[in-house]
Image (spheres, rainbow, N blue to C red):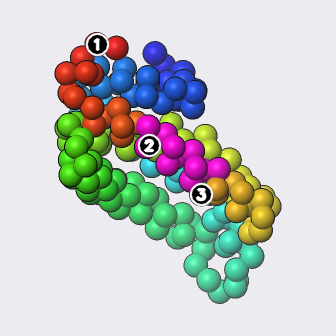
Amino acid sequence: MAVTTDILATWRRPARVMRRLLSMGQREDRALAMLIVACLIIFVAQWPRISREVYLADPGGPPLEAVLAITFFAMLMIWPLMAYALAGLTHLVARLIGGRGTWYSARLALFWSLLATSPAWLFHGLVSGFIGPGPAQTVAGGIVLLAFLTIWGMSMIEAEREPEAHRHP
């Protein structure tokens, strides 16, 4: 399936999509690509907010290009490292409560959840940029958080099942 089709399907049935992704075998290159694309989309989603903040800020402050460069570095260098650490930590916690998945399945669950919620991140970025701080931005942020935690939670449940359960879609 196309990634966009999988993203839409994930919003309806996250466990089914995660099961199918896991059944494709352990492909670290695919997981890393999901993470990098998710981070890139989340970075792009920040542009409207960053542009607004720089425009409304003190004229003597850093230029837009500098803020975008710093954000780009953070999103594509720091976030991936943090995502690997978070996936490892959640796998350890899952192991403590009876999870039987693998390190890879935990990474895939997190990375896919970030990518699958990227449309919500884009929505939040537009609200933050065009409307700014206030109730609309809070609601949009709540939608992103709820969607991400729901999809990630359901994906982690599937990822921490018996590894043999992932072999057949």
Q: Is residue 30 visible?
A: yes
Q: Earlier in the sequence, mark 3 or mark 2?
A: 3
Where residue 128 sits: x, y (%)?
70, 60
Residue 152: which disc?
A: 2
* Left or right: 156, with 91 as reference point: right
Q: Quadrant of residue 118?
A: top right
The kind of secondary structure element at disc 3 is helix
Which residue is located at x 56 percent, y 53 percent? 145
Q: Which mark is residue 46?
A: 3
Left or right side of 126 for 43: left
Q: Earlier in the sequence, mark 2 or mark 1?
A: 2
Secondary structure under tag 1 reads: loop
| Real-space CA distance between mark 3 and mark 1, rounded to the nearest whole angstrom | 39 Å
What range is drawn magenta here? 143-154
Q: Position of residue 82 (x, y in %)?
A: 32, 59
Magenta segment includes 150: yes
Horizontal side of residue 78 vs 37, given as left or right:
left
* Residue 161 or residue 83, whichever sits in front: 161
